[in-house]
Image (cartoon, helix red, strand yellow):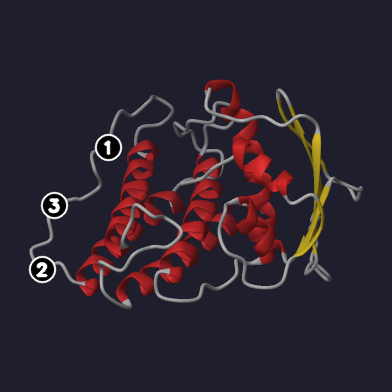
């Protein structure tokens, strides 16, 4: 996916998230984020937008904390006012992001890519997953677009590989393998097969068809949701040892 596609996807995901936030009571629990109700998740997403907006305005120099993202206390806290607050933050975020080229310098926590392109990609997946979370607080969630979900799976592996050396809370595997096979990519110019090996020192990933200790066949969106420990929308075919997915979640957990 290119930069503009990531930006467009992120904005579409935020729009859907805001619609779900506005659809009912703010104190409804978010089943996939047990510590959050709808309002807390909206605040979290607002903080995400605020922090990256702050980073984009400061170039590659570490910008320091951006505050809690509240931009003031709402006098009349309702689903509509919270949605309007988040929509305003999103408008500022995307105005800034669209004003920057993909290679524009921007501090990120990912040292190999300190550009606006990283921010756009990270936003597209953060907002997609939390859009699913917000919709689940209201009932059912829509799937993630297949191309976006495939890129999201690639980002999962990138995040894990980069962050693993800095974390001492990971539970590594002992050589187990997991094959992921996306079933809904006919006509799309994307690859959707991965063989993940859970080594004692971290993950290795091959983009190939191969036999794993666990094989998972599903839509690409549902494969991404499985990695993120979210419910799937459609059926998932599983072959082999289901505990391998639990081992993977010892390597990668997203709040």
- Disc marking residue 72: 3
Residues under numbered marks 3 and 1 in contact, where contact means CB atoms less than 8 Å apart: no
Instruction: Please state which of residues 124 and 238 is positioned toward the viewer in this rendering.
Output: 238
- Residue 201: x, y in percent? 71, 23
How many angstroms separate mark 3 from mark 2 (CA)? 12 Å
Q: Is residue 67 left or right of residue 73?
A: right
**Tag shown at residue 76:** 2
Q: How many marks?
A: 3
Q: Determine the image quadrant of residue 175.
A: top right
* Secondary structure found at label 3: loop
Classify mark 2: helix, strand or loop. loop
Which quarter of the figure has residue 163?
top right
Q: Secondary structure at mark 1?
A: loop
Q: Farthest residue in the left direction?
A: 75
**Quadrant housing the N terminus:** bottom right
Q: CA distance from mark 3 to mark 1?
A: 13 Å
> Measuring 12% from the left and 61% from the top, which residue is drawn there?
74
Q: Are marks 3 and 2 in contact (CB under 8 Å)?
A: no
């Amino acid at each position: 996916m290119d930069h503009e596609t990531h930006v467009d996807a992120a904005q579409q995901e935020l729009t859907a998230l805001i619609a779900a936030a506005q659809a009912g009571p703010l104190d409804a629990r978010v089943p996939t984020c047990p510590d959050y109700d709808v309002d807390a998740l909206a605040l979290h997403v607002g903080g995400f937008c605020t922090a990256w907006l702050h980073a984009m305005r400061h170039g590659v120099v570490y910008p320091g904390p951006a505050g809690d993202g509240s931009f003031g206390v709402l006098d009349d806290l309702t689903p509509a006012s919270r949605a309007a607050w988040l929509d305003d933050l999103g408008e500022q975020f995307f105005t800034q992001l669209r004003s920057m080229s993909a290679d524009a310098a921007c501090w990120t926590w990912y040292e190999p890519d300190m550009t606006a392109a990283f921010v756009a990609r990270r936003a597209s997946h953060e907002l997609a997953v939390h859009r699913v979370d917000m919709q689940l607080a209201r009932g059912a969630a829509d799937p993630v677009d297949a191309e976006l979900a495939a890129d999201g799976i690639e980002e999962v592996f990138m995040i894990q590989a980069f962050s693993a050396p800095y974390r001492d809370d990971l539970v590594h595997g002992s050589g187990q393998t997991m094959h992921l096979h996306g079933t809904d990519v006919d006509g799309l110019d994307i690859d959707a097969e991965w063989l993940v090996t859970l080594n004692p020192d971290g993950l290795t990933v091959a983009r190939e068809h191969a036999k794993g200790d666990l094989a998972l066949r599903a839509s690409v969106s549902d494969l991404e949701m499985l990695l993120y420990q979210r419910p799937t929308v459609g059926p998932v075919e599983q072959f082999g040892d289901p505990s391998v997915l639990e081992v993977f979640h010892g390597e990668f957990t997203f709040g």
